Amino acid sequence: FNYMTWDQIREISEENFVEIGNHSHTHEYLVEEKSELIKNDIEKSISIFKKELGKNSDFFSYPFGEYSIEFKNIIKSLNFKYAFGQHSGIIHHQTNSYYMPRFALNKNYGKLDRFIFSANAKPLIINNFYPSEIFLRKNKQPKIQFDVLSDIGENQINCYDNSGGSWKDSKLTTNNEMRITLELNDPFLSGRGRVNCTAKNNSEWLWFGYQFTVE
């Protein structure tokens, strides 16, 4: 690996279109650790930021996108204003500012057509997502429900999940008020359980993604 030096980081951080975000100190699977260990790890990264850049970032990215209510509360208590998961989607006015989505642009998903699609996608706006706990310890095959606020019909939406370790169509039902219920074919495997929903509205693609952390 070729790592950037702090001199290089300081150089690019001076540009007004660049933000150097915090990503923890160890980049370990922190979500399953005790709160004290998580907080100590993040506080160490903050002290390094202040030493090398003169300030900490307002932005945090959860290691591996793994999130829990406890982890979020720690990040919030340390005065971060925004935090990113690792689920795909578009930020909009109803996005949880401590669990914001982002499209991956890497070795597997970094081709030009993928970039063009991601840049042109619109948010599939949802509300009242259930379950509220994103860190699944016991029920690894939860019934997922949410309200669709985007102006689409029930036949326009399709959802997919990686339950059982492979991507497949989710079992989707909806009522007249666009309350969506998803039933997984299998339990999520340990690690990260993902759900993606898309809808095509005229020529525009709408996208919603969600990631559970699975014990």
Image (cartoon, rainbow, N blue to C red):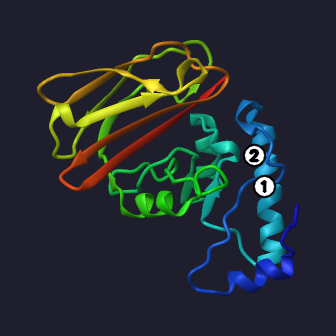
Q: Position of residue 56 (x, y in %)?
A: 70, 69
Q: Residue flagged by tag 2: what amino acid is it?
A: Lys
Report which residue position mark 1 lands on: 43
Q: Residue flagged by tag 1: what amino acid is it?
A: Glu
Nearest the viewer among 185 and 46 is: 185
Q: Position of residue 18 (x, y in %)?
A: 61, 78
Quadrant in the rendering for residue 181: top left
Residue placed at 87% from the left, 66% from the top?
2
Q: CA distance from mark 2 to mark 1?
A: 6 Å
Quadrant in the rendering for residue 199: top left
Q: Position of residue 114 (x, y in %)?
A: 49, 57
State yes or no: discs 2 and 1 in contact (Cβ < 8 Å): yes
Q: Which mark is residue 39?
A: 2
Side (left or right) of 200 relative to 185? left
Location of the C terminus by quadrant is: top right
Side (left or right) of 189 relative to 211? right
Q: Compared with residue 78, is residue 39 higher up or lower down, i.e. above or below?
A: above
Q: Position of residue 12 (x, y in %)?
A: 71, 82
